Image (spheres, rainbow, N blue to C red):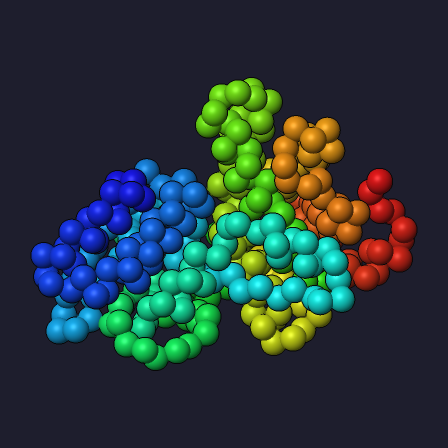
Amino acid sequence: MSVPAARRFVADGLMSWGRSDLMDDATLCVSELAGNAALHTSSTFMHIGLGLHRDVVRVSVEDDGAVPAQAVTPRPSFPDPADPADLLLEDEATTGRGLAIVSILASDWGVEKTLGGKRVWCEITGTADEHGVRLPKIRDEEAVEQSEQLLPAGWARVRLAGCPVRLSLRQDEHLDELIRELQLAGAARANPTSQALALELQDLLSGPAHARHMGRRIAQRAAAEGREFIDVDMAMPREFSAEVEKLDVAVKAADVLCEEMRLLTLASSGDLRALRAWMTEEVVRQARYGQTPVPWEHWLLRGELPG
């Protein structure tokens, strides 16, 4: 089902129940949930659910994409007023805000694991209660976190020690912006280079989706707590180190397109390139060779920054 079809389905259902007063909030929420599933999960299907119990309308979107249930989280903004780069990125960002909108509009929302993927749901009541961005309810989050402590054969733990929180979130937003524009350019089939690069980036990101989104979630929580640096622990297959190296090469190629003004997205800034170089090196050193982590600030002291 497409996003417009999801909106029509919810709108028609509310009209038939005589609850058109909830239509604006409910259709906006299902648009954000369906759009998020279509853009970020590489799912083969979307199933839209709509239910009415007393005065509460429940909307859900189920998919079988690679993004796990525990990685679904709204992306709040934490711009630094003293940092022009933060403010510029905040003005540019067009992705990752949908779940925050859902969490504000809905009286309650959460994520459920399914046999094939996950189901994101929200409840709409139409009350005037006000609240900010909230994390979703995840039914078996603790069980998932405990199970991750036992790694399968061939997996390794990687720690990004002393990872800079704001810079990490900026890099994540920049990558989302880059992929979004490459997808749009590729869809038009007017730029074969962009189309090929978009497919390559999507393929490289599909494997490490769990690690990437868990890292994002950890950084978001740290930012909400006002922390500047945090250790990010991830579990991944050891061969994933080769995919990280390929991803670094692909993003560099995309940066060239940005510098040549063949894309509207700005090329990675120097600090973002340095962070990506450090993260790539740490994944390769730890996952492939079993070496100990080198904290971000210690790595910077080496002076081996990318051009």
Query: On the image, which quarter does residue 264 sit in?
Result: top right
| Residue drawn where x is 70% and y is 50% of the image | 279
**Viewer-nearest residue: 148 or 199:** 199
Q: For this view, does 89 lie left or right of residue 207?
A: right
Say which of 10 and 114 sits in front.
Answer: 10
In the displayed structure, 68 sits above or below 199; it is below
Please indicate, yes or no, whether residue 157 appears anywhere in the rendered image.
no
Find the residue positioned furthest to the bottom: 129
State the residue in front, 162 or 306.
306
How far across and how far down the image is residue 165, in percent? 67, 64
- Up the image or down, 295 lies above or below 261; here it is below
Q: How many labels sit on residues?
A: 0
Residue at x 84% of width, y 56% of height? 300
Is 178 situated left or right of 83 in this image?
left
Q: Quadrant of the C terminus?
A: top right
| Residue at image point 56% right, 22% down | 191
Q: Is residue 52 left or right of residue 62?
A: left
Quarter assignment of residue 120: bottom left
Residue occupying image coordinates x 62% and y 57%: 90
For the question of whether residue 280 can be seen, the reply is yes
The quadrant of the picture occupied by the N terminus is top left
From the top left corner, tell me how far across and down residue 89 is, in percent.
65, 53
Question: Eyeballing the image, is 192 above or below 174?
Answer: above
Residue 145 x/y as whole percent = 46, 66
Image quadrant of residue 296?
bottom right
Instruction: Pinpoint residue 224: horizontal percent, then vertical percent.
Output: 58, 73
